[in-house]
Image: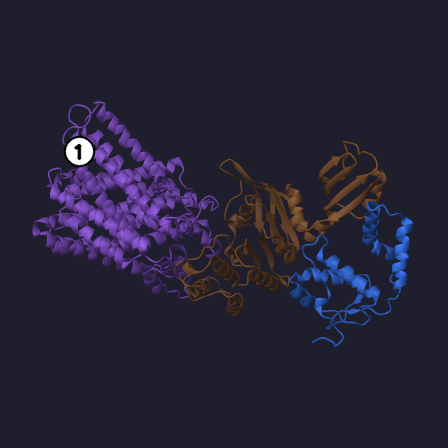
Amino acid sequence: MQAATSLPARLFVLQPSSGVPIYRQLVDQVQRMVASGQLAPGTALPSVREVAELHAVNPMTISKAYALLEGEGLLQRNRGKAMTVAAGRRNQGTLAQRLRQVEPQVEALVLAARQLELDASDLAEAIRRKMGGKS
Amino acid sequence: MGIARIAWLMLTWRPLMRWMLAAGALFAASGATLVLTGVSHSVGVRLLVLVGTAIGLIPVTITGGMMFRAASDARAIGLAPQGELRVLAGMFTTLVAMALAAALAWSLVLGAGPGPGFAVPGHRIAAVVFVDALGAMTAFFLASYSLTRPRIPVLAILGPLLAVGLILGIEPDPHFPRPDSPNSEVFTLLAATVLAWLGFGTWFLGRSRLRTRAHGTNTIPWLLSRWVRVTGVRPQSLRIVLAGPLDARMTAALTFAACLALFAFIEIVTWLGGTSRHHGGAILFFLVVPYMAVAAGSATGALPGRARSLWLLGGLDRLGLFHLAEASAWRQFAASAGAALLACVLVDEFLLHSHGTEIPLLVIAGFAGVSMFYFQLFRTKGWPVGDIAVSALVCALWSGGIGLAQESARSPQLLPWLAPILLLDAALVLLLRWRARRRWQVIDWRVCKRPPTWKGWTGSS
Amino acid sequence: MSQPVLSARGLGKVIKGRTILKDVHVEEHRGSVIGVIGRNGAGKTTLLDILLGFSPPTSGESRLFGHDSLALPATVKGRIGFVPQQDELIPMITGAQHLALHSSLHPRWNGDLVARLARTWEVPLDRPVQILSVGERQKLSSLLALGHDPELLVLDEPAASLDPLARRRFLQELLEISSDRTRTILFSTHIVSDLERVADRIWILREGALAWSGDLDTLKESVVRLQVRARRALPAGLALPHALRQQVRETWASALVSQWSPGEVQDLRDSLDAEIEVQSLGLEDLFVELHA
């Protein structure tokens, strides 16, 4: 039923009891996976039904997430087949848009830094080191 | 929970029981005051005391066995130390207390001479009444317990107790106890009662609780469930949901069989006790069976509450449900009352050869039963004060009517008095039907709840 | 599709002088899964009873499929399945006999669905109801309500007596049957985690009034807790916008606000000269906060 390259529904981690709505969690996870390259263009995503069944959540919320991602151009609908990651989306939006993506994490980081009385330069150094270590 | 508290609960668990206890206490107390202070010794006042006591006694007598079973089934009772013993003791205490109350009332009423206070042999009357009352209430208790859970040992204990009572020729005549009966008879009955309690207590405390728990099904309901016929025909299904799976023919058959079994039992016992007691047995039969007809009417109780299940299922509107409930009540009543009255007629004609002197009694019982079930249909809002007043009227009419009809068997000149009672009954039925119909059109099932299941008794200590 | 499946306007109920419900307005359309939460005694069961026509409201009106609840025509009643909190089973007959009984009361009966569910949920059908456990009785009641493919399914505390595994299976089944969006499901529960999985609309009943009715996602996104840490003492009369509740202590404030949108945080931070932590809350926390 699925292409060999499709992914298991278990890939997503959904927490229904979180303050973040389920559809939002899914949208965020797909966005990050696409940005990190974990989801290559052309990869088929698990069907709405599969994800909903595995996580025991309302399929409507999964459809909502997929529809939103399609609207943003991250996913594309293929008639009769599973949704796939849209091709040719190396540029995922302007710098401002991308920065907005990590805004929650930045907020949390800044808050923690203030509580520990670290200043911006200490923080920037730590970030540079971390990112320098990776890609 | 203390034994006294359990005893109190047995008397007051349901609102209706509290009302009846209060009403009975009120009547008895006012009558007693009048007699004791010497204001009046008329028959009416004495009757007030007797009626008050009777009203107070009725609930626990009739429902005692069922309540006891519900209480003893509660898990909390089993877990509490000596929980079962306490419940048993509580039940015993209740019955003894009520028997004492009856004894007090009767000795007061019958022993009182022109002056205030007790007259000799007031204590003699009290003793006899106490023993009779306790014995009768014990028999009722065992019988109603057996209804909920037929067990051979309990029936084996009940049988001899009934037999002793009947052989001793207990005349179930509310006006005259037997202050002249020999001491031996009184002691025999007391001994039989005590033995019955000891036997029951031993069986009850000794039985394996696990075994009875697993045994969920009672024999009688199992028999009933075999008769459920769900044929795919809608009216039949609606009736089953409304009134339970008891088929009308099954009801009639069971009732008829029960009446004949009762009569047979009484006949055997009175034959054992000597033929001179024959009349007493027959009187007992004709006392019990008309009340069965009346009870058949009240067995349709909680129909308004049960109709709730059909609101979404049956496709009927509220008025349609009323007509369905009414038809269902008529069907069940006709089956059970019809069978009971038929049994009476057969016994009357072929065995007692009294040639129809009991017919007025049966007619009155029929009318009383109809008014009873229309009253049940009428009760859609719990027990507001108005309904209690109406219930008093209904009870007064049927007990008065039946009492009068029984007297008329001995004194035919009372027969013409039955006509106005019948007319009143008929008028009451029409009135109740009209009001019930109006109430059903706006019935509020949030207020009119289904009857509480026995699970409602938690008995928490 | 445009006509709401169920609607209530100005619904109020008073029993024996006690106000059980006041001024309830709801409107729900086909395909929604609606969860009703509230404390015991908040009026959930009464609201369900009034919507279904079991009880006349003291004020206001309630409609199902466009018809007044008290006067539902037989065809409409046939499209409703109801699982009450206290089951209304007949003690002496078996589960199979109950199914036969109910199937004779409905023209359409999905025997296959019922058989499958009886297997999956492990409902014993051959024993008299009186010896079934509470959970088994609840499952049987649910079976009876589902058999005729109702368009509106109303469940009052359907899973309260089920163990977690049984509850999970039950929820999955509910999701399965609601997946085609032609059915509307309304259920009241106090097991909030179940709701978060299954419901897309939420009604929160607090002391007889609707504290919230709307999408669950919107609820989580728009009702947040703000923790404010200011550099200077905050004014005592501080009123944060749309605050449902707030506490102010010198330089610290905490508030539960509604109608929140993420853009507001910067403005608030500037106007108060404070750090603001925005916490989104799960449904259980929201529920507790609303009742604090």
Chain B's colour is: purple
State the brown chain: C
> Between residues A33 and B330, which one lies in front from this camera angle?
A33
Reading the image, the residue beneath label 1 is B123
What is the secondary structure assignment of the residue under circle 1? helix
**Residue B406 horizontal/vertical position (percent):** 17, 43
In which image quadrant can residue C163 be found?
bottom right
Q: Which residue does the image show at 72% across and 46% down from the upper left?
A: C223
Is any atom of residue B333 visible in this view? no
Q: Chain of mark 1?
A: B
Is any atom of residue C173 visible in this view? yes
Q: Is residue C95 left or right of residue A7?
A: left
Q: Which residue does the image show at 47% across and 45% down from the upper left?
A: B444
Q: Which residue does the image show at 37% across and 48% down from the upper left?
A: B83
- Mark 1, other Cα within 10 Å: few <14 / some 14–19 / many ≥20: some
Q: Is residue C232 left or right of residue C115?
A: right
> Between residues C77 and C173, which one lies in front from this camera angle?
C173
> Between residues B186 and A12, which one lies in front from this camera angle?
B186
State the blue chain: A
Q: Which residue does the image show at 53% across and 66% down from the upper left?
A: C117
Number of callouts: 1
Q: Amino acid at mark 1?
A: His
